[in-house]
Image: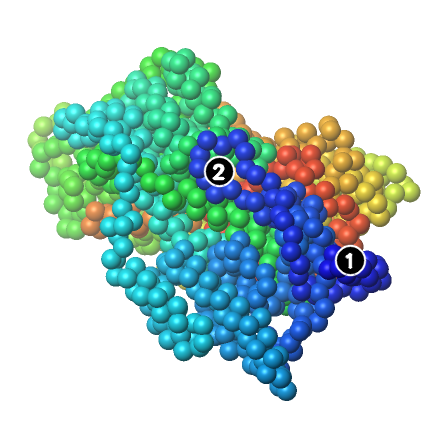
Amino acid sequence: EKGRVNMALRSKVKATESKGIRFPFFGSGGSSSGKKGSGTTAKRQESTDELDEESTPPGLGAEEGTGASGTSVGPAPVCYTPRQFVIPSGPFAEEDTEENILFEEGRSVNGVPVIKAATLEKLVERVTHEAHPNPKYMARFLLTYRSFTKAEDLLDLLQQRCELPEPKGLSAEDRNTFVKKLQMPVRVRVLNLVKTWISTYIHDFMDDKEFLDKFMAFIARVSEYEGMKLVTKYKAQLEKALKGQEVKAREVVYRQNPPKVIKPNIKGSIDLLQLSPVEVARQLTVIEAELYRKIKPWEFLNQAWAKKGGVKAPNVLEMIRWSTRVSGFVATEIMKAHVGHKVRYISHFIQIAKALRELNNFNALMEIIAGFENAAVWRLQPFFNEVPRRYSQILEELHEVMSTGKNFQSIRATLKTVDMPCIPYLGMYLTDLTFIEDGNPDTVKGNLINFTKRRYVAQVIQDIQQYQQTPFCLKPEPIIQGYLRSLYIWDEEKLYQYSLEFMPRSAKDKSVKELETLYLEKEKEKKASRKKEAEEEGDWGPLEQVEGYPFFEKDSKENVSFDENGKFVAASLPKLVQRLTAQPTPGYMETFLISWPTFCTAKELAQLLLQRYNVPQLMSDDEKKKEEYEKRTFSIKSRVINILKALVDKFSFHFLVSDDLFIVISDLLREIRPTAGVLSGAIDRIEKHLGALAAKSRENKLGKVERRNTPNFPTSQDTSSQGIMRYTPDLLAHTLSLIHHDVFLGLRPHCLLNMSISDDTPVVKDPHWHDAMKEFLGAYSAAEVFVYDFTVSQIISGNSPNDRSQSIEFLIDVCDFLEREHNYCTLLWVLNGLSSKTVRRLSSTWSRVSSAKRNLFKDLQKTMKTCCNVHSFREKTYEPGDRFTIPCIPPVESYLAAYLQRLDLPDRIEGDLINFEKREGMASLVHDILKLQNLKYVSSSNAEVKRYLNFQQRKLNVKGDILPRVAKVLAEEPENFGSDHEDIFVMKLISPEQHRSFVNLAKTFLANPSIYTFSY
């Protein structure tokens, strides 16, 4: 009889729902048909609930107001009638309606519909439901509640849930039924939730004393209710656990003894080659296992590791920092190694990587591979080619295992086959969580909490947690751990400079033996140069005593510093100037003449150059010695003149922004002219050029771009076409390049040279340069955001998947021409638009894009991903002689991020020595920008295309036009999230760290904090 009633009720519900009416659910029984995990030898948590049956990958949840795809688990849910008891007041008085709770259409577990979104009160009501306990829902609720409410607010609701008010006018029998069927079951559910909370998520209480006090007060209150006495037992368990009395019970008992530690045979300082690769892998695993197990579940919520300096995710951040250190350690050790030993170091790291794979430490394995793929190391391919075949084969296999392609498909497949213990690659899960956070709104239909999103997040967190349960049976080795924890890591710029020394760009095709010979010859030249410099500055005998002469002092640890390889890194200001006017060192003069405003004033520089020019006389009667000394003196004077010439000719940007510099240098030239002799002609030429610069400065011509004749572009492929395809891809790409190049010219060198780091924030104290930086960042950010908006809007403006696929193909061709024009700024943001979460969702559209265009799109993403690294960009665009020869717009975000990284180094080291190594990195980046700004595209922009782009920019200034269209198009496209087109997307063209660094810089100077916040 009950079955017939249910069947009749189902028919009635189905008929009613077909009219667009939905009912809340009261419930019925049913058995789950969740699928079982397979193919793993590891004992891990198996998911058997509704998510296992979903085809939706993380980050691509159903949109607001639409149902998720996937098959139902269990029988179809029975819709419920209004409550048997009407709650008269309080947060749980409301009946279920579409205004306070939504369900995934056609999806249920054990006959209970899957919650899609709800108010906080309804979520709490469901987690403590009187008739339908759901442990998996409770687990996910407790894992993610911090992402949508505060713990204190949750406690308040749980207390009110225990205090459900009795409906008025109940008979004795009805009152008994109310207590038995509703009040007591709800209190039992609250008890179960408290028990689970204490036993499984005890860290919630350990790290928040204020919350612990409130929780204890909550337990004291609810323990007074009928049926809630058991809560005092849970309180005692919590107190016992917090006092550490259960530590012994939780100690791990191994089935076997840890493997014997391979003790290092150390003679003197530790060298990596003295350490066993297996033991290094073990100690890395011991350290990383400790870091991994310390991570708390809530650190993965709301991308906490990437916000506000990661203060809410300290352990995730610590793990990320450690991973960065290890990959930096790999690159540094290879680069520090003598040219003849590099192959041995590479082979040693491959052995460490193999041991890490055998230990199932995939996180450290990825760190080793990342170290190999560092731009400075990866370019040393001749050394990798000399690695013994057995090791190179191992490296190939490890590359395959750790491939990040197809959404980490290989890594995920490998993880399913390993035994515990294991440390998975954390970056994979952080990518999943980023995808989920970016691809799903926090709320839907106004203010309903999107719990579908939280289920996705909880599933990822549960995957992470399962690997925290089983510890490694390994014994710490203090010497090796101390070595690993105290590593000195070189920064990117230093790594790259050393890489160029070992293998200049012009020597890419040489063998290791030839490179070794070339390097040793250069070292001999350097030693000879240093010897000659020492002889010049050597003891010539008694000199004329000049008061305040700063160059009498000999080199010592107090005034000059070298690194472990003998490379000059820091000095006092007089020593820097002395080195500047000594034997020429490649790159030193360029670095000094670009960066001098960061460590001295124009007057200080001029004074030191004058003193260096006026070398004291030799007080000796030895004529031969006097003659040699005069030659040495003339060399120094010539170098001073050459430095002034280079300052005026090559680095004239200093003069175009400072009237004081004109006066100081003019005064200096007047002072040295009387004793210049044959050098007077050079002084005349410098003064002439200085006058021209003064005139140019007065006319304020800086930044004006001269264009030459325009190439003959066809204005249209099809005169009947509308929108973007009325122009050819090359014409649109070229016009965008010209517009963006003009914006790029706004990045003035002194905006960077006047910048400093204060309280982890980049600042420009000079008001003039602060405003100039603000103006550039505003124009640049607006241009990038426009290109992104423009790309998405052109695609979704199509009326059908065919129209939209044609727009995608056209824009891929535009990207191809942008790459040919070396416009990596616009290329980055067109590619980002094509990869946006809106465009990715257009499955039907992408299915109509030709395979040739899809492959081209994938290749362009790989090219862009490479070029987003400053050093890889240089490798691609530098011509012989380390110079740019063709117009190019670099990845400005990467350049600024790299500059900020270098800027963050200390200005002075080892007491009060000027950190010249820091200036080398800063100057090389500024020098690149200067050279690229001087290379201009040869033609002017097409007026018609420019008008069209200006119109589109005005139209897109208000995103109200684009958002409704996005919703409409997504509603038209089928939700086929498992489509084949997903594998063509390359995640994160620019690294999150670089983008975050640039966005923080932009937000420091710009008033609009949401400039890089996209809703689609």
- Sequence-first tag of 2 and 1: 1
- At 28% from the left edge and 37% from the top edge, which residue is drawn? 254
Say if 338 sits above or below 329 in the image: above
Decide if residue 700 is on the left or right side of residue 517. Answer: right
Decide if residue 413 is on the left or right side of residue 843. Answer: left
Say if 658 sits above or below 728 in the image: below
SS for dot 2: helix
Residue kind at label 2, given as amino acid type = Val
Residue 594 spot, x, y in % from top left:
40, 44
Residue kind at label 1, given as amino acid type = Arg
Decide if residue 821 is on the left or right side of residue 865. Answer: right
Callout 2 touching callout 1 (CB < 8 Å): no
Residue 870 badge? 2
Classify mark 2: residues with Cα within 10 Å, few (<14), some (14-19) or many (20+).
many
Question: Quarter of the image containing the N terminus?
Answer: bottom right
Q: Nearer the viewer, residue 781 or 344?
A: 344
Q: Nearer the viewer, residue 356 or 954?
A: 356
Task: Report, in whole angstroms, how far the alpha carbon at label 2 lies from the one at label 1.
Answer: 72 Å
Q: Nearer the viewer, residue 507 or 942?
A: 507
Q: Nearer the viewer, residue 82 or 63?
A: 82
**Mark 1, residue position:** 4
Say if 472 sits above or below 180 in the image: above
Residue 284 spot, x, y in % from top left:
31, 35
Q: Residue furthest bottom?
A: 169
SS for dot 1: helix
